[in-house]
Image (cartoon, grey):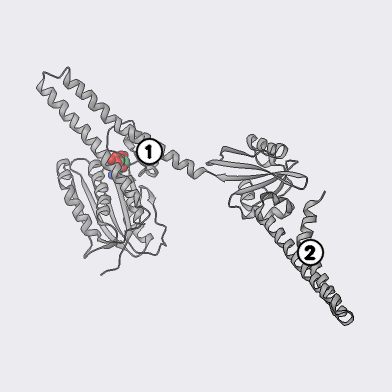
């Protein structure tokens, strides 16, 4: 039975046949008029009826193709090619012998095969998908199969397998939807929650222990009580800092997709940031030297957020510089990105260096930078790529659970990203570290 061919004949050939009949009829009318006018009128009525019937037939054919789902039977296998090609996801059509009967570019690229006619089992080693294809062809069953692959990167795929028929033939349509991005976002969210609660639980556990100690063994000893109260203060401060940093980070992330449109003077922002940290530096016995260019350095940016960047970087620099050491903060501007990178973070030939963030804009834009250099212990090269990761602390990697929240550099990175700028680090163990953030220069007013 070749039902598709018959139906296509009805759709394609009928108009031509009717037009031919119409022409013949007109000729007949002309001839009939000259012989018997009353017969000619009946003939005219018959022609109109034919015309209406043809239109009705055409309309029926169109609606059937456009609206009825099972009318996929109208087209042959080869004609499904453009349909597969139009699908955004990788798609394969598998015939009843388990061979590839059709595919789109996405599928050929993803599964790395060239020819039609290959067996599905030869290009895809997923038993569940093969079984689902078989069930679709043999039993007309539709299934969804989810699976993971891990060649170089881990990928999550959702494959929907649907049965298809045309004529007496059966096939399975396989559409592969890549779910990797959704999975990694979900995992990141879960990791973030797990990390945040772990970080909050640690000082909370210390506080509980200290309270028990004060209420128990240290109850009657005033000196011990004072000592434990000071320790409680440290843990409470740590929790407060953690909550503040988490809130800051989520606020920044909320509008990270909207670049700032304000103007700020980077020199002034640096001056104000250092004023706020004067007390911390003095307490630690660290000198902070500020080098500014002449005149203002106008940048496209939000003043409060740029202050957060500089304060976080300088705070770290003070924290990691030993007593008596010096931190140097420098503001500068440059004509293009390569020049700004060279000036801001290529000063120590022996140092390890990395761009933690790079702007997507063309390299010929003009940028202003702030470089914060310390005389601390430096950071080993292997840890550099992880700086800016939430909760990452080098100290913890070395088995020391103390230290900050591990959120400061994440805040810096997100703010700089919102400003469509860049973040660089160069560091040399034994010499120190230098972090540099750069953002686009604004027109001088
Ligand atoms: P923290 O609150 O722990 O300082 P950050 O996100 O600011 O969090 O920094 C993450 C980690 O990066 C720090 O714990 C530290 O190990 C390392 N780090 C950051 N700045 C410096 C620096 N100037 N010198 C040495 N290590 C640094």
Q: Residue at x 32, y 51 (%)?
A: 415
Q: Is residue 7 left or right of residue 104?
A: right
Q: Is residue 169 left or right of residue 200?
A: right
How many marks do you count on the picture? 2
* Element type at mark 2: helix
Q: Which residue corresponds to mark 1?
A: 192
* Element type at mark 1: helix
Q: Which residue corresponds to mark 2?
A: 14
Give x and y (percent) for residue 301: 29, 59
**Residue occupying the far right of the picture:** 35
Q: Is residue 179 left or right of residue 208?
A: right
**Residue occupying the far left of the picture:** 222
- Contact check, label 1 and label 2, Cβ < 8 Å: no
Q: Callout 2: 10 Å neighbours few (<14), some, many (20+)?
A: some
Q: Nearer the viewer, residue 421 or 18?
A: 18
Q: Is residue 230 above or below residue 332?
A: above
Give x and y (percent) for residue 418: 35, 54
Ligand 1, image quadrant it occupies:
top left
Q: Callout 1: 10 Å neighbours few (<14), some, many (20+)?
A: some
Q: Nearer the viewer, mark 1 or mark 2?
A: 2
Quadrant housing residue 143: top right
Q: Residue at x 65, y 43 (%)?
A: 162
Quadrant housing residue 243: top left
């Amino acid at each position: 039975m070749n039902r598709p061919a018959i139906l296509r004949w009805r759709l394609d050939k009928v108009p031509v046949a009717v037009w031919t009949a119409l022409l013949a009829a007109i000729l007949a009318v002309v001839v009939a008029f000259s012989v018997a006018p009353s017969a000619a009128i009946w003939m005219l009525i018959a022609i109109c009826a034919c015309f209406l019937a043809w239109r009705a037939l055409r309309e029926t054919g169109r609606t059937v193709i456009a609206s009825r789902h099972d009318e996929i039977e109208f087209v042959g296998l080869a004609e499904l090619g453009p349909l597969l090609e139009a699908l955004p996801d990788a798609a394969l059509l598998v015939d009843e012998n388990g061979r590839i009967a059709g595919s789109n570019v996405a599928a050929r690229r993803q599964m790395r095969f060239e020819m039609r006619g290959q067996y599905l089992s030869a290009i895809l080693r997923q038993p569940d998908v093969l079984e689902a294809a078989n069930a679709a062809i043999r039993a007309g069953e539709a299934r969804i199969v989810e699976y993971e692959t891990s060649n170089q990167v881990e990928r999550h795929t959702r494959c929907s397998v649907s049965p298809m028929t045309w004529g007496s033939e059966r096939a399975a349509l396989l559409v592969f939807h890549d779910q990797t991005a959704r999975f990694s976002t979900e995992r990141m969210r879960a990791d973030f929650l797990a990390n945040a609660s772990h970080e909050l639980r640690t000082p909370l556990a210390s506080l509980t222990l200290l309270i028990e100690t004060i209420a128990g063994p240290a109850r009657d000893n005033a000196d011990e009580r004072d000592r434990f109260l000071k320790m409680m203060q440290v843990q409470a401060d740590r929790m407060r800092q953690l909550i503040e940093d988490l809130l800051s980070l989520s606020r920044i992330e909320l509008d990270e997709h909207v670049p700032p449109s304000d103007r700020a003077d980077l020199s002034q922002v640096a001056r104000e940031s250092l004023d706020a940290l004067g007390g911390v530096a003095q307490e630690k016995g660290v000198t902070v030297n500020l080098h500014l260019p002449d005149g203002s350095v106008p940048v496209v940016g939000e003043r409060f957020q740029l202050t957060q960047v500089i304060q976080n970087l300088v705070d770290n620099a003070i924290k990691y510089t030993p007593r008596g050491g010096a931190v140097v903060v420098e503001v500068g501007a440059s004509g293009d990105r390569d020049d700004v990178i060279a000036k801001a973070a290529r000063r120590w030939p022996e140092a390890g260096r990395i761009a933690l963030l790079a702007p997507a804009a063309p390299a010929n834009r003009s940028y202003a930078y702030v470089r914060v250099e310390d005389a601390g212990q430096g950071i080993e090269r292997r840890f550099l790529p992880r700086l800016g990761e939430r909760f990452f602390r080098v100290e913890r990697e070395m088995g020391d659970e103390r230290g900050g929240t591990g959120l400061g550099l994440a805040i810096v990175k997100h703010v700089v990203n919102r400003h469509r700028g860049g973040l660089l680090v160069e560091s040399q163990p034994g010499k120190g570290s230098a972090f540099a953030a750069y953002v686009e220069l604004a027109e001088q007013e």
